Image (cartoon, rainbow, N blue to C red):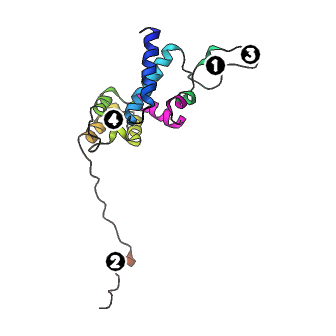
């Protein structure tokens, strides 16, 4: 992929990220791809600081031209924290899990692709086989939690009956 192809793909990703109809999963995929392309171009800063020290001249350095997470978040129109969480999801979801999530079409029956909390939970699972099994269970249909019986306090158990 030459530099013009990288720039064209980055432009397309940036346009897509500014759209408001993307799911959290689609945003995560775009951000992960964007990060990889910027690293290929040498435009992604990977650590803090501005890349200079007190003994350097006032000339602009390559490291100062690299983009930080805050820069990228602002360009994408989201907060730094949201951008960082979406990037983490994009990096940490296993390919098999990604395929399951990408194949969910009906957000009415399964909201996993548009649920940042669920995606972040999956991304934090280190066991990728477990990650895949959870994604399959969620994608296969609604999971109904077991209803816990409410234990009444003593004052509610023996209420005096009301007079007729």
The span from disc 2 to disc 4 (Cα, nearest Å) is: 43 Å
Q: Where is residue 163 in the image (x, y as percent from the top left)?
A: 32, 91
Quarter of image, res 91: top left
User: SS class of the residue under badge 1?
Assistant: helix
Mark 3 or 2: in front is 3
The picture places residue 153, in percent across and down from the top left corner, at 38, 73
Dot 3: element: loop
Residue beneath label 4, please?
A: 131
From the top left corner, tell me how far across and down residue 56 is, in percent.
74, 15
Q: Find the magenta span and give its range.
A: 73-91
Closer to the eye: label 4 or 3: 3
Q: Position of residue 123 (x, y in %)?
A: 40, 34
Q: Residue at x 54, y 20 (%)?
A: 44
Whether residue 77 is in magenta: the answer is yes
Q: Residue at x 38, y 38 (%)?
A: 119
In the image, residue 28 sits, relative to residue 62, either above or below, namely: below
Which residue lies under the disc numbered 1? Answer: 64
Which circle's residue, 4 or 3, is located before the other in the chain?
3
Q: Nearer the viewer, mark 1 or mark 2?
A: 1
Point out the tag, 2 or 4, that comes first from the N-terminus.
4
Looking at marks 4 and 1 on the same chain, the residue that comes earlier in the sequence is marked by 1
Q: For mark 3, what is the residue? A: 58
Q: Earlier in the sequence, mark 3 or mark 1?
A: 3
Q: Mark 2 — residue?
A: 157
């Amino acid at each position: 992929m030459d530099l013009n192809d990288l720039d064209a793909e980055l432009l397309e990703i940036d346009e897509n990220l500014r759209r408001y109809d993307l799911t959290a999963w689609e945003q995560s995929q775009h951000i992960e791809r964007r990060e990889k392309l910027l690293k290929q171009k040498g435009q992604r800063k990977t650590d803090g600081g501005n890349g200079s020290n007190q003994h350097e001249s006032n000339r602009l350095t390559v490291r100062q031209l690299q983009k930080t997470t805050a820069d990228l978040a602002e360009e994408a129109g989201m907060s730094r924290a949201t951008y960082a969480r979406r990037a983490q999801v994009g990096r940490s979801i296993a390919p098999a899990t990604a395929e399951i999530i990408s194949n969910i079409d009906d957000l009415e029956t399964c909201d996993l692709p548009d649920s940042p909390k669920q995606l972040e939970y999956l991304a934090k699972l280190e066991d990728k086989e477990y990650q895949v099994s959870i994604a399959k269970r969620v994608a296969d249909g609604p999971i109904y939690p077991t209803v816990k019986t409410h234990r009444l306090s003593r004052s509610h158990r023996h209420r005096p009956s009301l007079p007729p």
